[in-house]
Amino acid sequence: MAGRPEPGSDHELLRSVAAGDAAALARLYERYAGALFGYLHRLAGDRMTAEEILQDTMLAVWRSAGAFEGRARVTTWLFGVARRQAHNRLRGRAAPEPAGPGLPDRADLSTGPEDLAIAAAGGTPVAAAIDLLPEHHRDVIALVFVAGLPLAEVAEVLAIPVGTVKSRLHHARAAVAAALTQEVPE
Amino acid sequence: MKDWLPAYAAGSLPEADRERVRAHLTGCARCRAELAAWEAIAGVATPPGPPPDPARTVRAALTRSALDGSAGPADPTASRGLSASGGPAASAGPAASAGFAGPAGFASYAGFAGAAAGDRRARPLRHLLALVRAEARLIRLVVPVASALVMALGVALVLLPGPGLPGGAAELVLALAAPVVAAAGVAGTYRSGTDPAAELVAATPVSGRLLLLVRLALIFGFDLLLALAASAVLALAGTPGAANVNALVAAWLGPMALLSALSLLIAVRFGPDVALGAAVGLWAVRVLAGGTLVRDAWPARFIVEAWSTSAPILLVSAATAAAAVILSGRGEPHGGWRATHPM
């Protein structure tokens, strides 16, 4: 068993959470708020559902912090918990809902009618294509590019070999590219 | 090298590896093109909008934890709450967590996932038991007490030493008392105005049919036991013509079932007061038809036949009761009393 975790580390913070320190839970969330919420938002497709799953996740972290044994990184554990909560809530949902209305971040790329349609649907063409990916591809994209986890950690979170993470990434990219080159019907 | 490009675009590559990728990119146009594709994805992968406020998020989670009734993380049983909210996918959880939680962690995860599965199976049963207990508390004491008194009076009438009770008196008394006692009780099961929980029932999320079934089971079951007990007492006391419990039970079972079923159907359709009146009226006709006033005319014989214990009668009773339960829950609460009066 490893000795005492370093003061101020994620592990130390999680120990405080396990001991019932609510402020430590808030600090832990603050550290990963952007990555964690972005990941859930990308998985859920809309902000409201993502906020619900985020709450589920914080509740689960609060309750099961004591089960963390320090053999993995806290981030791996945290995103593992978040992913499980997302699956619980999104299970049985037929298809990902389109992203809610938000400002397209590359509105200057083009002003063609199909681009306007995509922007109206709530994002850039690439973002729209990501939203249409099958769930296991979206999960990998979100963990790599939104959560910013190294591929080895992504593999741990998903409980799949690193090679599978890489192949899913390439499939996802190919699917996005295919969606972008597709003719948009008039 | 190609495999490193996504992580490079995501910015999650360690500095040493970044350096190597950068060096390679300067001399490889294909990898530069591929990186551009990854960067296009990386640039838009994060949905717009700031994450929710930490204080608010944590407060909401802690409030839910408190409302769910399980303790905080210091409590070793707390982890059960996770799987309770987790549902079946919690059993997929251990596979994902085993890699880093270690064997002990795996065991605890698997343990509470199993406990949750047990909870799910037992929940409908426990729910039903709680419902029965709650309904039993709502039955006004006067209903079982009055039923028991009437039956006890009947038994006493047969048992008391008195001049010249004819043979078969035991059967007659039971056959007269049991059906009307049960029918009166059943009449009050559906949307009775004197039900202390009438308004609550009207607003309850539990199906009205389920409530009705639970009440019926309680009331009719109680009256059934009462009549059985009375039959047993009379048989054991050796009353003349009442040595056979089977014959005694046959004297009241069919009429009791049929009259109760009719009473229920009328209660569901027209309200408890009409049902009680109709049940008593029907039963009065039966008593008169079997008595001395009318003799041997075919309607009287038919009426007596209809109020006996036989397979067709029991089937008709069951069908009538089923129809009543199906009809229940339609229309506005409290029978004919509309929320608004016609102008």
Image (tube, grey):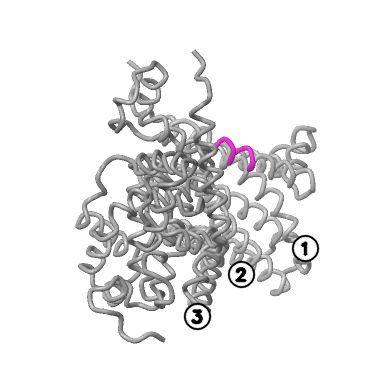
Measured in 3D between alpha carbons, the distance from the residue under mark 1 to the one under mark 3, in whole angstroms, is 62 Å
Residue highlighted by disc 1: B246
Whether residue B180 is visible to the viewer of this picture, yes or no, is: yes
Q: Nearer the viewer, residue A149 or A54?
A: A149
Whether residue B149 is visible to the viewer of this picture, yes or no, is: no
Q: Secondary structure at mark 2?
A: loop
Callout 1: few (<14), some (14-19), or many (20+) C-alpha neighbours within 10 Å?
A: few
Q: Residue at x 55, y 49 (%)?
A: A168
Callout 2: few (<14), some (14-19), or many (20+) C-alpha neighbours within 10 Å?
A: few
Residue highlighted by disc 2: B160
Q: Which mark is residue A153?
A: none
Callout 3: few (<14), some (14-19), or many (20+) C-alpha neighbours within 10 Å?
A: few
Q: Secondary structure at mark 3?
A: helix
The chain carrying label 3 is B
The chain carrying label 2 is B
Q: Which mark is nearer the camera, 2 or 1?
A: 1
Q: Which mark is residue B104?
A: 3
Q: Are marks 1 and 3 on the same chain?
A: yes
Q: Which mark is nearer the camera, 2 or 3?
A: 3
Say if B8 sits above or below A152 in the image.
above
Decide: marks 2, 3 in contact (CB < 8 A)?
Answer: no
Q: Amino acid at mark 3?
A: Ala
Quadrant for the C terminus of chain B in the image: top left
Q: Give percent across and percent down for residue B140.
A: 41, 56
Q: Amino acid at mark 1?
A: Asn
Measured in 3D between alpha carbons, the distance from the residue under mark 2 to the one under mark 1, in whole angstroms, is 23 Å
Measured in 3D between alpha carbons, the distance from the residue under mark 2 to the one under mark 3, in whole angstroms, is 74 Å
